[in-house]
Amino acid sequence: MKKFNANAKRNGLIGLGVMIVLAGATVFGSEPLYKAVDSMSGTSLYTPGTYTGSARGYGGDVTVDVVVTAKKMQSINVKGEKETLLDMVLPGLTDTILSKQSTEVDAVSGATLSSNAIKKAVDQALAQAKGEKLESSSAYQEETVPQKESSLKDGTYSYEAPEFDENGFKDQVNMTIKDNTITSLTWDCITKDGNKKSKLSMDGNYKMTDNGPEWYEQAKAVTDYVIAHQSVEGLTNADGYTDTVASVSINLHGFVNGVKDCLSQAAGEAPNAKSSLKNGTYSYEAPEFDDNGFKDQVNMTVSDNTITSLTWDCVKEDGTKKSRLSMDGKYKMTENGPEWHEQAKAVTDYVLGHQSVNGLINEEGYTDTVASVSINLYGFVNGVKDCLSQASGEAAENKASLKDGTFSYEAPEFDKNGFKDQVDMTIKDNTITSLTWDCVAKDGSKKSKLSMDGSYKMTDNGPKWHEQATAVADYVLQHQSLEGLINASGYTDTVASVSINLYGFVNGVKDCLTQASK
């Protein structure tokens, strides 16, 4: 009897165990019941649901949708239309985060910014799931607000390092912008005797290691990277090397500086006033009088790499100064508001305070920055830029070591109107002493002669083509430089009487100077 009771007791316990297992299977096979059991099994980490976080990645915003139960992350969905490196990161990174239930995981090599953006966005979503107030919400907001795209002007921009490095090379970067996009980019380094590092590398005369890509191949890899990503953001570390482009081991500081400089030019920013300025006093005078009979004059003094004084005035043919007329009440703009001389003083004070004209004017030449100023500042800004160019040695650099002689340029092909640009330049004592520009047709006809004879007509009013060509040649002779002559579209805002495109002329002048400097 006792034996039967023991067996019955044992069988009863077994049966109860089976029931518990089956009940457990039923509970855990049901999602709502599972969540209920999960939430009762210990302290809850999250409020179940789907939460969204965002952070700034390499090429744009990264957004994540994180689904959580009370105890764990269940899934992570990542979106980022402009984030081009997501394919390198997903799904490996999110799988690792889910596996470890933590964002304390390593970033994916070569896509650090994208990896960190995902981790930050997940952290943001989890903080919401925990009901926490983000202490760093402002930082997240800063990262998630779409950055305003720079308005880059179409054109070709060039950069050359201010001095040779310890190995005797200067970085050179050339960039072409079209429709707000970098369409071409080259990087090279040049020696004092004109040898290019790319050519030395191709010929085997510039060797780094026995294995691995050559210098010119690595240079091509980083230019391709920038064209693909339209940015140098995240390309280099603090030492100037890259963890992003696996095949590249060379230092990229010079390249990155060049790209940034070209982008600054394309964005219409002025050269940094603090870059290697020589002590001295520099002057600028506009090449001709404006429609109101005035010429802009700017005078600048530089000491210890700083603009220490700056004046702006406009002068008439008889020597009368606009500032004097303004002070005497003879140059009146409006009944209310500051006089011309007061506004001129306000903008010079601005430049002295900021050591730059960056952000001072809009596309029309007016300012939204200095509230008291309503006058047009194109002439002033051109003058400041010209003085800064002189102080940075750019004008002298353009003339450096020019050989005496006569140099000629002819465009490689006829343009759509059937003309070829021709430029002739004479150099004497390191100075351009004569300069002519013409265009020739296939039959040998010269545009200057056709213009003089009235056979090449542009408009009924305004200077003829040959007069405009003479005006720009005179400008270069006076300034011994092309600095500030043309905008990104090839036209000039500097020589008021000129409305024709000057790309061919500028190319010819540069070619002649290159010949003279060899």
Image: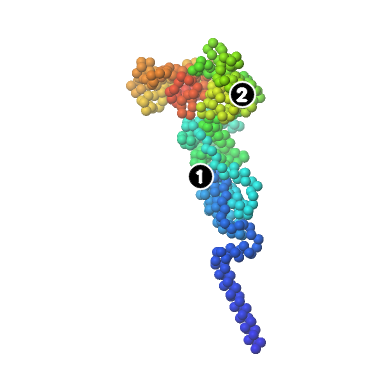
Q: How is the image coloured?
A: rainbow
Q: Where is residue 283 in the image (x, y as percent from the top left)?
A: 58, 18
Residue, x 52% and y 45% (percent of image)? 83
Disc 1 crowd rating (10 Å Cα; few below 14, some 14-19, many 20+) is some
- For mark 2, what is the residue? 346
Q: In this view, does 508 lie to the left or right of 245?
A: left
In the shown orientation, is residue 491 left or right of residue 400? left
In which quadrant of the rendered view does residue 468 lie? top left
Please tell me how crowded label 2 is: few (under 14), some (14-19), or many (20+) other residues with Cα within 10 Å: some
Task: Name the residue nearer the viewer: 191 or 269.
Answer: 269
Mark with earlier residue (1, 2):
1
Which residue is disc 1 drawn over?
Answer: 82
Q: Can residue 196 be seen in this view?
A: no
Query: Cα distance, mark 1 to mark 2?
Result: 42 Å
Can residue 272 be seen at all in this image of the molecule? yes
Residue at 58 percent across and 63 percent down: it is 35
The type of residue carrying mark 1 is Lys
Q: Is mark 1 on a helix, strand or loop?
A: loop
Q: Nearer the viewer, residue 230 or 35?
A: 35
- Does 182 appear above or below 100? above
165 with respect to 417 (left or right) = right
- The x and y percentages for residue 344 are 59, 21
